[in-house]
Amino acid sequence: MRTPLIAGNWKMNKTASEAARFARELVQSPLSTAAIDIVIAPPFTALAAVRDVLGETSPIGLGAQNLHWEDRGAFTGEISAPMLKDLSCRYVILGHSERRAQFGEQDDLIRKKILAALTHGLNPILCVGESLSERESGATNAVIERQLKGCLTGFEPSQLGPLTIAYEPVWAIGTGKAATPEQSIEVHQLIRRTLATGWTTSVASGTRILYGGSVTPQNVESFLASPDIDGALVGGACLQVDSFASIVRLAQTRIGH
Ligand code: 13P
């Protein structure tokens, strides 16, 4: 059984002190962690502050938003997997469309980052998704397959247990125009087929696939009603404790039943 996952990608939001306040409010909010995995991914500068509030064994997992594929060295401004592990990070978001579009990240580089994450015991959340023009030109499936193959080529099925995939259509991110559950389900099924043919059926059935893009407390249930959608990667709506906690609660009442 795939445990549902609700992950909050804070992007470049909140100072360390704002993040600590958020974490204190989150742990004090009436939030059950039963039957679900919860992850928050603050900026690098806030990881230690959030870890100090959550504690190292919190059921709320700590995630980073990126890493460098080397362990150490002359890479000014970069952060490595061992550094994240040392801060009690358990997850790392990789290949987000904002990194692809604004920082030139391509599939082969993302593959190296996934390898670094897996090598150091971090659970990668790999983001894939098509742009609006790619969708409108009917290229969605080809883009998703290319991204999956480009990012995951060379991994043995036995390595991929910790992997989560997030389908985040670029046109749905931060626009208030979420994909429809039908559009999302179609791509989630394509992702599973690609994992089955490129790796194994157990990789396909065991990998969590999240939907991301304008997820809110208002629409999250419509996605999670489908057995094909294992959770959500939330941006804007994860920045307030109330809305993030509501998304978690709604997910708990709708999925896994
Ligand atoms: P929004 O929820 O703000 O659309 O962002 C989604 C996202 O990019 C999460 O990684």
Image (tube, rainbow, N blue to C red):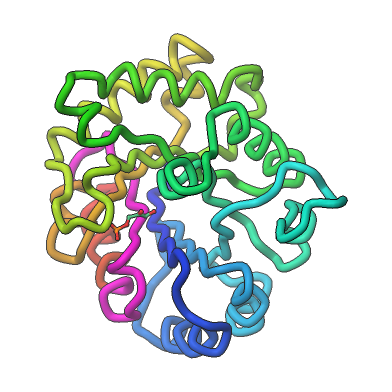
Q: Viewed as shown, does residue 154 lie left or right of 33?
A: right
> Does 39 appear above or below 137?
below
- Most foreground residue, 172 or 92: 172
**Residue 229 position in % (x across, y down):** 28, 40
Kindly identify the residue that appears in the image at 49 percent across and 12 percent down: 198
Which image quadrant shows ligand 1?
A: bottom left
Q: Residue 202 placed where, x, y %?
A: 49, 21
Instruction: Quadrant for residue 136, please give it.
Output: top left
At which x and y percent is residue 59? 54, 67
Magenta residues span: 225-245
- The residue nearer to you, when weighing 196 against 46, is 46
Tag count in the figure?
0
Identify the residue at the far top of this view: 197
On screen, residue 229 above or below 36? above
Q: Is residue 22 magenta?
A: no
Q: Quadrant of residue 33 in the image? A: bottom left
Which quadrant of the figure contains the N terminus?
Answer: top left
Find residue 132 and report its horizontal and vertical position in percent: 21, 36
